Amino acid sequence: MPTASLSAGQVKYADTGGDGPVLVLLHGVNMSGSLWDGVVTRMPPDVRCITPTLPLGSHRRPMARADLVTHRGVSALVGELLEALDLTDVTLVLNDWGGAQFLLADGPNERVAAAALVACEAFDNFPPGRPGKAIADSARVPALLWLAMQLQRFGWFRRAPGGWGWMSKRPVPTAVMDEWFRPAQQNRGVRRDLRIFAMSTPGAAELSALVDRLPSFDRPVLVVWATEDRLMPREHGPRLASLFPQGRLVEVDDSYTLVPVDRPEVLAQELVQLASSVSPGR
């Protein structure tokens, strides 16, 4: 995988190439860019898909500047990545983690021509549901975070109700989840980054102010929400879409939060439509 050297450290990413629309697809905590594999393989060959692995617990190399691994800091890293790769007219796609909304609201977002918010954190739902809050709680004590990561070695724990079993209706392949959890299980520096990130959850006042600023992003925004989601309240989908001047809501059945895992074919079709609508040099 190629690597981008950013202010916080090195970020690896996959890049399919292609001379058509550009999508940058972002994942959540304890996941990597491989979350999007089922979507990327369904894309037309000219669509360029870039899937970075952000420092959210599944990155293999600890960050050089751990103090920058916060919700706002990682959002800024996404902006740095777009600049480092000299990407323009980007369709930015979020799933699970919603912190990149700070980039949409506050910039610099000149390189972002459209956005898709797919079953992600929004409003006061930071961190989302019981799984997110469990990671945030365990992060307060390093030994508990270590234990939480070690328990993820076991399939029964991964699919337990209230945990990863609520993230997707269809189990994520064992080899993929092994890849996601191994860095935090084995590397103290990665756990340090994850701990700092988990403890940086914005407060209620900051999240409320973010909501007030989101309508300033006046480009096309697709909000994709799973009707059976157990972590992201269903009412957040239409509410989020209504914030944006060019917001549009699509609800997806037969899926939990990880729509890229549960319904990749539907999501790929919607993302191609959105990205194809972007006017170059808007």
Image (tube, rainbow, N blue to C red):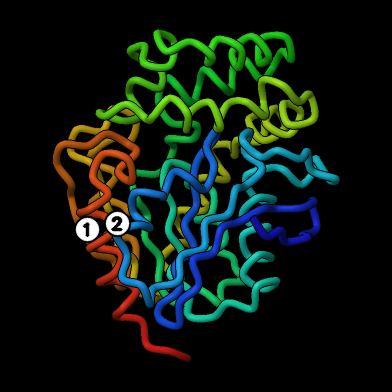
- First of labels 1, 2 by sequence position: 2
Which residue is at the front of the view, 79 or 175?
A: 175
Relative to 54, say whether 278 is above or below: below
Helix, strand or loop under label 1: strand
Spot occupied by residue 229 in the image (x, y as percentages of width and height): 26, 33
Relative to 156, say whether 165 is above or below: below
Which residue is at the front of the view, 12 or 246?
A: 12
Judged left or right of residue 121, residue 188 is right
Spot occupied by residue 24 in the image (x, y as percentages of width and height): 49, 63
Q: Residue at x 80, y 58 (%)?
A: 7
Q: Give the residue furthest to the left.
A: 253
Which residue is at the front of the view, 11 or 144?
A: 11
**Quadrant of the snapshot with the C terminus:** bottom left
Spot occupied by residue 228 in the image (x, y as percentages of width and height): 19, 33
Identify which amino acid the numbered label 1 is placed on: Leu
The answer to whether mark 1 and mark 2 are in CB contact below 8 A is yes
The quarter holding residue 62 reads top right
The quarter holding residue 35 reads top left
How many other residues sit within 10 Å of disc 2, few (<14), some (14-19) or many (≥20)? many
Q: Residue at x 40, y 49 (%)?
A: 37
The quarter holding residue 234 reads top left
Could you give the CA–CA distance between mark 1 and mark 2, rounded to whole angstroms? 5 Å
How many marks on residues? 2
Residue 223's disc is 2
**Quadrant of the snapshot with the N terminus:** bottom right
Residue 249's disc is 1
Q: Residue at x 27, y 52 (%)?
A: 224
Helix, strand or loop under label 2: strand
Identify which amino acid the numbered label 2 is placed on: Val
Q: Give the residue furthest to the bottom.
A: 281
How many other residues sit within 10 Å of disc 1, few (<14), some (14-19) or many (≥20)? some
